[in-house]
Structures are given as C-alpha cells and as structure tokens.
Image: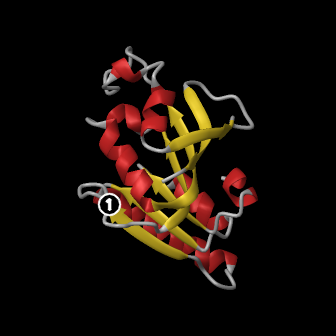
Amino acid sequence: MTELRKKGCQSVLDYGAGGGHTTLLAYALGFRSVFHHEFKIFHPFVQWRAQRMAANDNFPQPPDFIFSAAEQPMPHNNIVDGAICTDVVEHVPDPNILLDQLRNALTNGGYLMWVATFIEAISCHINIHYAGHEEELLNRHGFHRIEDFPVHYNGHTGIYQLRK
C-alpha cells in the first residue's frame, strides 16, 4: 500500500476486499478515495470499522469511502489511480472479466498491486491452468510489470502499470 503512495496515488480500489483489512489500511494511510469492492455481506462491518477509525483518529478530512458490490459488475470507469488485487483471481470463474474490471476502474497509467497463488491443492482455487501464465494474462489486459514487491510473497506478485 505504501508503494502506491510513493507513486503518487490518491485513490485506491481494493478488489475482492473481504473483511476490509487492506481497505482500512488505505483509509488510515490517507488516500483521498477508497473503494471497497466485495460482496455486500461484508459492507456493514467494514463501514462500521471505518466510522470507528474516523471517530477515534480524528481525521482532519476523512477520505471518501465508497462501497461497490461484487455481486454486480463494477459500474465505475477511470475512478482510481491505484488498485490492489491480492489472492482474488484464483477464486473467480473468469479472470479475464476481473482484469477487464480492473482496467476499466484504473486511470491510464494507474498502478496495480497483484498477488495470485494458483495452488491446485486448495479446493477453492479454480482455473489452475493459469499458474505460470499470469504475466501473459496481465499483459493481454494492458498491465505491464514495472517492479517486484519490496518483500517476498508466495505466488505470482508484482506492481504493474496500466497502458490503455
């Protein structure tokens, strides 16, 4: 997340945000806008946590905190200059749709922090045939690797820039 800040990102999308840990970190780091894209069942809990953080930390100007329901295609275009997608793609039926949504949400030149771990032994990991081909998949959708993560992480990781 700090890598996105170093690159000047002011708005961030947490795609497949789950319980909101990464979303709330973005909130705490002072991103101007934070988008939480996840199934609606998570939204009330994450919203409650964000409200508590704002009350306890006395944000001078709380960031815009926007929820997007994963049950629907993302309705947003060119809304963020940074996105995070960690350990999500291996759970979706069609990774191409996920990458199209990320591409559409990002501004041209926007950044993607990516982690994918296609492990056959984990039963909820589908599309195992993408293992070892993640770079090709990302390139096909306009994402080009610009650097590695500053820390080692299992699976396929990287920081990518979008060229539309």
Answer above or below: position of 43 versus 102. Answer: below
The count of marks equals 1
| Image location of residue 82, percent across then percent down | 57, 58
Q: Pointer 1: what residue?
A: 74
Vertical order, 6 against 139 (above or below)? below
Above-or-below relation of 61 to 38? below
Residue 146: x percent and y percent?
A: 67, 41
- 70 above or below 87? below
Q: Secondary structure at mark 1?
A: loop
> Which residue is drawn at the image coordinates 39% and 37% (left, top)?
89
- Residue at far bottom of view: 60
Considering every residue shown, the one lying at the far front of the view is: 164
Q: Is residue 164 visible?
A: yes
Find residue 92 and report its image quarter.
top left
Q: Position of residue 97 (x, y in %)?
A: 30, 45
> Residue shown at 32%/60% (left/top)?
74
